[in-house]
Image: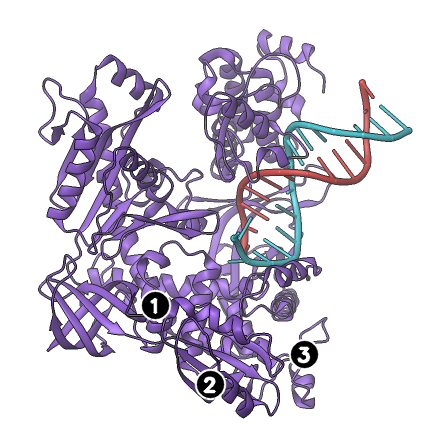
Chain colours: A purple, B cyan, C red
Amino acid sequence: MREKVFLLDVDYDVENERGVIFLFGKNKEGKRILVKKEFYTYFFAMPKEGKEEILKQKIESLKNLPTKILSVDIITKNWMGNERRLVKITIQNPRKLKDVRDAIKDWEEVENTFEYNISFYKRFLMDYRIKPCSWIEVEGNIVENKFDVDLTIEAKEIKQLDENEEPQIKVLAVDTEWVEIEDKEKLIMISLASEKLRKVLALSEWQGKQEFVESYASEERLIKRFLEIVKQERPDIIVTYNGDGFDFLKLREKAKQLKIKFGFGIDGKELEFVRRGRASAARCFGVVHIDEYVFVDKILSASLKSEILTLDEVASELIGEGKKELEYKQMVEFWKERKELNRIAEYSMWDAHLTYLLSQILLPQIFSLSRLVGEIPFDTSRYTYSQLVEAYLMKKAVEDNVLIPNSPKTEEKESRMRELPYKGAVVVEPKKGIHENIAVMDFRSLYPTIIISHSISPELLNCGHEECKEKNTAPETRNHFCIKKVGFIPKHLKFLIDRRKELKEKMKKLPKNSPQYKILDNEQYATKIISNAMYGYFGFVGARWYKKECGEATAAWGRFYIRKIMQMAQEAGLEIIYGDTDSIFVKKEGLNLKEIEEEAKKFVEKVNKELPGIIELEFRGVYTRGIFVAREKGESGAKKRYALLDLSGNLEIRGFETVRRDWCKLAKETQRKVLEIVLKEKDPEKAVQFVTETIKRLKEGKVDIEELTIYEQITKPLNQYEQIGPHVKAAMKAREKGKIVTEGSIIAFVITKGSGSISDRAMPVEFVTRNDYDADYYIKHQILPAALRVLKALGYTEENILKPKTPGLGMWLKNSKH
DNA sequence: TTTGGTGTGGTCTGGA
DNA sequence: TCCAGACCACACC
């Protein structure tokens, strides 16, 4: 029989010592399909020159191996740009691959071994050219269902289809609530949300509960009911917000205590925690668990405005809906006193609902990435940038018959880390002050286009051809790249860039809210992620395709081109206000907005005629006004800090305290307001007035603690800090009171009154009562510095702001020194 | 087991 | 007590 399957998950097992791949997905009727396929894995040995045959024979006559060697072949693959003969060793049991490799790796005939640490199912997907989250066609025989599926096929043939139709995917969002009572964690609610389902399973019965609440008398019943619902609902995907690190971790622990088998996959096995470095991922086969928080944290956070990645913040940014406010402390209190249970239920339901809503945005992005890099969504959604790039390159290597380089061992990584960093981008010191009628131009994808246009690829480094040396040596370096061949990385980077351009063209012809537009948008976003990460990947010590010289050369050409256009701009009579890496900000005295736009566009056109390859300057836009300020120390203009006012009256703020999470909201908002007044209303006096009022409010104790909370991340184990800053001290205090603080935790703290250093007075926000804050600190260290950063550029000083117009402020001025 | 380098600024620390 | 330098976090591109 033949069946088309939308592939959602892949796993494997070993049956009779043979590896069997399990592909799981849905067909067009929405039936659950399991496909089994026997598959044999392999690895390569690179023989020393001329030792191919002897190595082959030696391997063939190996005895006492934990698995059978099925074949030993001499094949050819491309290695560092050259054809290289390799011995391919195919074995029966994929779990024993490392044993076989270990048995031969130190032989004198063996120069090196390759592709021995690629997961079995990734090997399969690459070899069969199959993309997860897309349609495949399976031909084979129907066999008995041993799993909870509608159909099991033992495949003879599997091939990738080119159909774009999106199948019906059933998503179930899960959230749990726990309270700690007398040192014991109690599971009090599990909430579930899907397109149609809204349910809260509660460990309590109460009068007037909502219709979506089901009450159970024990945690055991609660968990069992949850598993029962999942079985009935048959979701394809379960989404959580931090399920890996919290909900499923706790649920499994609790289930273990209660001796309940906890799992919801199609194979009936227990939920498994797959180790991934420090973290672990909660996995069941077939019902794909996606932890939205992990994906947001690793991939999306870079492009989000949210400074803290709570469900609340992220959901409000991505879907415009926030969380129902209920603090943990309050919840415990309500629960203990058995009051307002409706509110807890409401809160829990809302969390699951938000998680579900978020999935409608995140899952299509994850699917798109999955297709591009060829990994299952379970893995894709948990990958970092470098892992995504690497997955993509590995897939392309197999397609191109290129040998995949090994991952560096610890020792190699350490040695790479000891290398000196190379020189990066150019940042031009800005011209301080307020400018009017500014045009901004930048290079479209500068680094990717340089890599492509200058043929930057590890295997093409220093080919030695005179022509390449002459025409393609990176500026300020001794390195050149071969232009007689198409490099592995430029080739596939070019595909991404071209594809993205093509997608953007198509998108222009579609209405922005159409489903088709969104699909294309997700794909262009996936290509953007991978292509933008390629440059950094060159210099990443953990990379298989690590090559510092490639990163160095890319940056060197970057400097070359930005300098080149800056010179051309000057020659064209444009005044350069600022520039960073790939952009220049210009103006011309006497030109209005329309005129500067015209000039800039003309300039871009002229420049592009001279730029090689696909390197291209783009006109970004014009701004009515902009401000650049001085550095705190000295007179020079501060780089990476500016604010621009665009034509529709929006402020684009970069680098200022306003956009940093380690400043309190009050200081940030005050600074934003100052920028706004200065740029929009051109009324610095009013801005000063505003700051004065803020200070007054602060002194009078009228400011909410929330506005004074500072957020900072803990980036290493607390005992490893050499310098105990405020956030570290606050973290220590939080830990003393039983809160869990780990690497990556974001500490929310407030500086309180009292004696001692700032650190001594830093308190986790949850232990701070309303009037405990140190107004003096917030005035001198938060509000004033933030506001003055801007106002100093207009000639104001601290005294101008603190000039005692009110007696209160005058007193304060006398009692503090400056 | 955190893609790169460039840059700003706050707080702590220890020696003068 | 003062201050330079180290440490640290976070932003920009």
Amino acid type of the residue tagged 2 in the rendering: Glu
In the picture of the structure, the residue carrying the numbered disc 1 is A121
- Residue A621: percent from left, percent from top: 46, 57
In the picture of the structure, the residue carrying the numbered disc 3 is A473
Amino acid type of the residue tagged 1 in the rendering: Tyr
Do the CB atoms of the residues marked 1 and 2 lie less than 8 Å apart?
no
Residue A214 seen in the current view: yes
In the picture, measured across the screen, residue A670 lies left or right of residue A799, that is: left
In the picture, measured across the screen, residue A768 lies left or right of residue C8, that is: left
Identify which residue is drawn at 62% across, 20% down.
A760
Mark 2 belongs to chain = A
Amino acid type of the residue tagged 3 in the rendering: Thr
Taking the view exactly as shown, the residue that stands out farthest to the front is A64
Dividing the image into 4 quarters, which one contains the C terminus of chain A?
A: top right
- Residue A161: percent from left, percent from top: 22, 76
| Disc 3 crowd, CA 10 A, few/some/many (<14, 14-19, 20+) | many
Q: CA distance from mark 1 to mark 3?
A: 41 Å
Q: Nearer the viewer, mark 3 or mark 2?
A: 2
Identify which residue is drawn at 40% across, 40% down.
A309
Residue A169 or residue A482, whichever sits in front: A169
Do the residues at discs 3 and 2 belong to one chain?
yes
| Disc 1 crowd, CA 10 A, few/some/many (<14, 14-19, 20+) | many
- Residue A357: percent from left, percent from top: 23, 45
Residue A505 or residue A195, whichever sits in front: A195
Q: Earlier in the sequence, mark 1 or mark 3?
A: 1
In the picture, measured across the screen, residue A447 lies left or right of residue A758, that is: left
Compared to residue A696, the image places residue A407 above or below, namely below
In the picture of the structure, the residue carrying the numbered disc 2 is A60
Q: CA distance from mark 1 to mark 2?
A: 26 Å
